[in-house]
Amino acid sequence: MKTVLFWLAALLPLATLGQKKPDAPPEALAEVAQFQQKLNHEFLDPAESPLSAAERATFKSLPYYPVRAAFRVVARLVRDSTALPFAMPTSTSRLPMYRKYGELRFELNGQPQRLTVYQSLDLLRKPGFADYLFLPFTDLTNGHGSYGGGRYLDLRIPPAGSRTITLDFNQAYNPSCAYNHAYSCPVPPPENRLNVAIEAGVQHDH
């Protein structure tokens, strides 16, 4: 298991977005290390992996962008209590039901950004997932270092009274259909297209 000190040593200078930010705290680096380790483990598990048996036999690790604190931001959550459920398009004919939970407003490179965050109606019925939020997005790296169809972030509803959520794009991951077309994956909606390169999280070398 890689230690936090390993990730501290691997942290590169933060010049990716043209704004100076302090180094990520050790606990943030530990979270990213844990995320990467967990994701790699899932790709080796036949019950969870989108890879074929032959691909799992040679799998070592997913490719990741270097960890950069500039891509860990605090977003203001603007909840939406009036949004109606809707059928979210996917890479297949499947149309799972979601509702808009709210908007996340933040800055990258001094420029205001906005992403819509969603709640799955199916997951609401599953124990342990009542506070689960889903953030699909695209950015300028899609097809140029990351998966062309966009990436996802998993989030949790913040405690009562909190109006912020930390977005750590170092934990952005690819949908399963990036590795296996048999999967049905939600397509990031047009409102979640970022006009900035998010060089963080899982890369895609296909």
Image (spheres, helix red, strand yellow):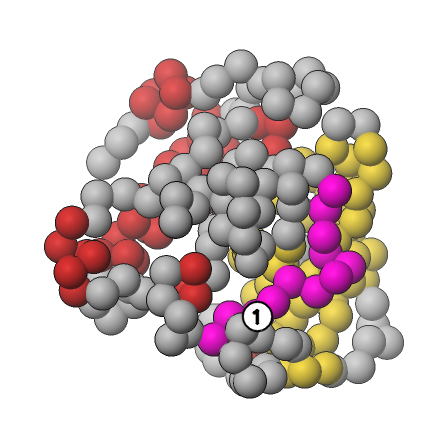
At which x and y percent is residue 83? Answer: 82, 76
**Observer-nearest of 143 and 27:** 143
Q: Is residue 121 visible?
A: no
Q: Position of residue 167 (x, y in %)?
A: 63, 44
The amino acid type of the residue labelled 1 equals Pro
Quadrant of the snapshot with the N terminus: top left
Side of 181 where 136 appears, left or right = right
Query: Which SS type dominates the magenta stretch?
Result: loop
Residue displayed at 41% across by 37% down: 64
How many numbered tags mark residues here?
A: 1
Magenta run includes residue 121? no
Q: Residue at x 39, y 44 (%)?
A: 205
Q: Looking at the picture, how far across and down is residue 35, in whole percent?
A: 40, 45
**Range shown magenta:** 184-195
Instruction: Note whether residue 119 is visible.
Output: yes
Residue hosting label 1: 186
Looking at the rendering, which quadrant does residue 66 occupy?
top left
The answer to whether 66 appears left or right of 57 in the picture is right
The image quadrant that residue 45 belongs to is bottom left
3 lies above or below 54: above
Q: In the rendered structure, does residue 185 fall within the stretch colored magenta?
A: yes
